[in-house]
């Protein structure tokens, strides 16, 4: 079974980086309602679009998701 997107994303945290994946990781780390146990693109994408307490470029998210799938 694939590890959750959140678990993978936390390995990308780097507060000094301006890379989109690092920025998203830091935002998600601070978000207590992020869906932490899923590997579903639809679930995470819908959350970012409708429920996240921050805004993030969704085309950057799509590229990050592809990186997640390729790890």
Image (cartoon, rainbow, N blue to C red):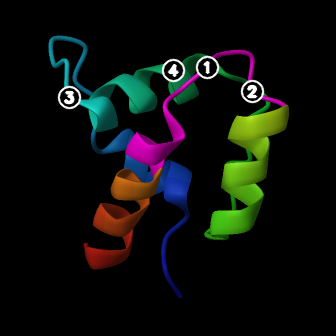
Compute the Cα span from label 4 to label 3.
13 Å
Question: What residue did someone put label 4 on?
Answer: 27
* Marked residue nearer the N-terminal end (4 or 3): 3
Residue contact between numbered discs 1 and 2, judged by CB atoms under 8 Å: yes
Disc marking residue 12: none
Q: Which residue: 30% across, 31% down? A: 20
The residue lying toward the viewer, choosing from 63 and 17, is 63
Q: Earlier in the sequence, mark 4 or mark 1?
A: 4
Task: Residue 50 in the image: state x and y as whole percent.
Answer: 84, 35
Query: Which residues lie in the magenta part?
Result: 51-61
Q: Nearer the viewer, mark 1 or mark 2?
A: 1
Q: Separation of disc 2 and disc 4 at Cα?
A: 10 Å
Q: Which residue is mark 2?
A: 52
Query: Is 32 contained in the magenta span?
Result: no
Q: Mark 2 or mark 3, which has the lower sequence index?
A: 3
Query: What is the distance, in whole Å, between disc 2 and disc 3 at their CAs?
Result: 20 Å
Using the image as rendered, state which of residue 38 and residue 20 is in the foreground. 20
**From mark 4 to mark 1, how far is it between C-alphas?**
9 Å
CA distance separating discs 1 and 2: 7 Å
Residue under pointer 3: 19
At label 3, counting other C-alpha atoms closer than 10 Å, the crowd grade (few under 14, some 14-19, many 20 or more) is: few
Q: Are marks 2 and 4 in contact (CB under 8 Å)?
A: yes
Considering the numbered disc 2 on the image, is that residue within a helix, a strand or a loop? loop
Sequence order check: which comes first, mark 2 or mark 4? 4
| Quarter of the image where one finds residue 37 | bottom right
Name the quadrant containing residue 53. top right
Q: Is residue 46 left or right of residue 37?
A: right
């Amino acid at each position: 079974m694939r590890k959750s997107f959140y678990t993978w994303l936390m390995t990308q945290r780097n507060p000094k980086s301006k890379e989109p994946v690092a920025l998203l990781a830091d935002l998600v780390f601070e978000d207590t309602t992020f869906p932490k146990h899923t590997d579903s693109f639809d679930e995470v994408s819908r959350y970012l679009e409708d429920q996240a307490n921050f805004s993030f470029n969704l085309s950057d998210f799509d590229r990050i998701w592809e990186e997640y799938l390729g790890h």
